Image (spheres, rainbow, N blue to C red):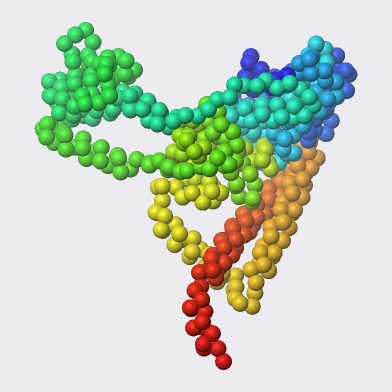
Amino acid sequence: MTVIKMPKQSNGTVHSSKDLNQLIDYVMNPEKTNDFKYVSGQNILDIHSTCDEMLATRTMANALKNKPRKNEIYGYHFVQSFSPDDHLTPEQAHEIGCKTMKEYLGNSAEFIIATHTDKDHLHNHIVLNATNPLTLNKFQQNKNDLETLKEISDRISKEYGCKIIVRPEQKLGNSHKNYLVYLAQNSYRKEIKNKLEFLMNHSHTWEDFKTKASALNLKVDDTKKYTTYLLEGSEQTKKIRDRSLKNDKFLKENLKERIERNTIGYSVEEVVKLWNDKESIQEKGQEKEIEMLLEHWQVTKETEKDLVVTIDTAFDNEATIKIPARCVDKLENGQYKIFIKKGDRFSYLDKRSPANHKIMVGATVAKNLQRQSGNIPLYSDNVNIKLKQVFHEFDFLISQGLGFDRSFETIGEELKATYHETEKQLDKLDTKIIEYVEQNKSLDYVDTTIRDTIKNLKLERDNLRDTLYKVDKNIQYYQKSEQRLEAYQKNQSPKHKARDDDFEI
């Protein structure tokens, strides 16, 4: 049985150079690692100078782009434990740890791994530098990322014959429908606060306040010890006390004091109209949900908490995102309906660059899922989308000078060749950047030449990635154009072809 986690005492985070040094000393203890036999690192030149190297990478990043922050994270600490029943050797436990972290973090991360053999159960300690030596950005770690790490650890451990904790299978139901019911039942607090906020600015006495509240279907009862509120005609069944709104300005005495300071008077009719106008504008400006159908083959994993979906990102990469259960309804035929907003933010893990934890907004997620399945989001104008696609396709044909004397196959081959060549150059440049950072991070002072070199290398990398992205987009347009032409040729009627033949000489 394999378990991987971040220690609870520290939450797996290190917040100073002193703590980082102490942690690395503990992890590398020769009495626990068979005199450093089971210690290794990635992008670490010498394991005995691990702390200095990690701090040097951080210093270089600060000199070039980052500024030290309060309570900054210097590193992360993971522990991977194995059961004695799995009968692993220290070498095997160490291999599992190395493979797990490399798949999780990619080749650019800077970490050290040490296998402790002093207890009945073998276990790995992994210390990760919070600064990535390739991007010089901070590595981000959250709960979803830890779940991904656990899944990788389980899969690799299983290859070595380890027993895996089988979690009970959990299924999604009508989670989104249930979530909407929950919102309807519990949104009254927010609505009460909104109305109180509005009324305190448009009333001139407490009695006037209560009269106008009633006109807005808010019943105010101040006849007892506590003032209570009830939204009439809503799902609210129990009155709510002013104190339970958790804001002192909504207490009766504070409301009265605020109302008495108003100098402009409004009639009940004016207040009702102003409120309705306010609600109408807010509704128009409110972000609408994107409703979209997912096929069962687009889903990698389903749990009670979320839906794990693999999508294609730029450059033909794959990424894994998790869609919360509250955004999902599972249909009887095995398909899924998801409900997300354009501005929703999803954390995703790029499979080719695992260290690159990025954010993808809901609109981009919807577009990627649409491209995979062909299911068009319901928020869109379907006819308009199809027209735009056609225009894009023929714009591409014109821009490429495609004529009868040049085949689709030739263009496709050229685009793919350009893509792969650019990809190779990018891989080489990534390696070059890491090697240069590793060579210079031990220097006491990062001079102007080193800074300029790294900046230029990173600029070159950004330009290459931009080129790769543009080529990838062209490939997509090419593929659409190819499909469009094939469909056009199939749709040519025999009658129309016969007419064309009549004019041949």
Q: Is residue 504 above or below residue 372?
A: below
Q: Quadrant of the N terminus?
A: top right
> Residue 10 sits in which quadrant?
top right
Judged left or right of residue 81, residue 293 is left
Give the residue at x 41% y 28%: 179
Q: Position of residue 389 (x, y in %)?
A: 49, 60
Residue 203 can be seen in this image = no
Q: Quadrant of the C terminus?
A: bottom right
Q: Nearer the viewer, residue 158 or 385?
A: 158
Q: Nearer the viewer, residue 257 or 108?
A: 108
Judged left or right of residue 299, residue 390 is left
Q: Is residue 238 above or below residue 493?
A: above
Give the residue at x 63% y 27%: 146
Q: Position of residue 34 (x, y in %)?
A: 88, 18
Give the residue at x 46% y 39%: 337
Judged left or right of residue 273, residue 433 is right
Q: Is residue 117 above or below residue 321?
A: above
> Residue 446 sits in which quadrant?
top right
**Number of labelled discs?**
0
**Extreme-top residue of the structure:** 225
**Extreme-bottom residue of the structure:** 505
Residue 431 can be seen in this image = yes
Q: Position of residue 335 (x, y in %)?
A: 50, 39
Q: Nearer the viewer, residue 340 or 423?
A: 340
Q: Position of residue 397 (x, y in %)?
A: 56, 69
